[in-house]
Amino acid sequence: MKKANEHDLVLQLQQGDSEAFTHIYRLYAHRLTAFASSKLNSLEEARDVIHDIFVQLWEQRMAMTPNKGLEPLLFTIARNRIVDHIRKNSTQESYAQRLKQLTVLYHSPDQLLEAKDVQQIIASAVDEMPKRVREIYQLSREEHLSIAEIAQKLQLSEQTVKNQLNTALNLLRKSIVIQSFSVLWLLDWLVS
């Protein structure tokens, strides 16, 4: 296939042209994979995400606007797929940290707001924890003390520290899930 501009590629893709799809894949798959693997720290997971991106591109080809660039579209889809993947496979702290890493490259106002919202949800959930659970959580996550160091500092058994950390993480998960459902409900209510 001759080198085509993106406008023509999108038009050909909308007509179901598999050569145009292959050309787009060859143009962007490597860079998208590099981007995804740098955020997921796993080439295998990145390849799964890239596969999903191109499946989505094919399935939604009719909704594409030929005048808009492919690169911003593909990297936006990639970012969203990476965030979804991280949400499904990470603890909430890890999610917030990875989300913060994503906002470094793509720092639109919406994306910064999303990261701040997650950080606020976490901070609020930590504030609402029972005193001892909060103290152990903060020693672990903010001061980066090991379980043994926390146990020694607070004169507790290591198992007690582990139990309290599990309690803290469960409270964080519940808080984020509740907040997510609240936001989805509000968005649904505003749209309908």
Image (cartoon, grey):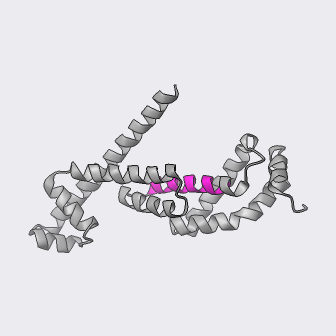
Residue closest to the far front: 109
* Quarter of the rendering occupied by the N terminus: bottom right
Place residue 132 in its image quadrant.
bottom left
The residue at 36%/59% (across/down) is 93
The answer to if 76 sits in the magenta stretch is yes
Q: Is residue 192 left or right of residue 72?
A: left
The residue at 16%/51% (across/down) is 130
Task: Pinpoint residue 174: horizontal percent, then vertical percent.
Answer: 32, 46
Q: Is residue 87 left or right of residue 27?
A: left
Q: Is residue 57 left or right of residue 134?
A: right
The answer to if 141 sits in the magenta stretch is no
In the displayed structure, 181 sits above or below 166; it is above
Task: Pinpoint residue 122: horizontal percent, then vertical percent.
Answer: 32, 52
The residue at 12%/73% (across/down) is 152
The residue at 29%/55% (across/down) is 169
Place residue 34 in its image quadrant.
bottom right
Examine the residues drawn in magenta and state their main secondary structure.
helix
Q: How many marks?
A: 0
The one of 69 and 84 positioned closer to us in this rendering: 69
Task: Pinpoint residue 189: horizontal percent, then vertical percent.
Answer: 46, 28
Q: Is residue 47 left or right of residue 144?
A: right
Q: Which residues are magenta?
A: 74-89
Residue closest to the far left: 155
Task: Pinpoint residue 89: horizontal percent, then vertical percent.
Answer: 45, 57
In the displayed structure, 151 sits above or below 117; it is below
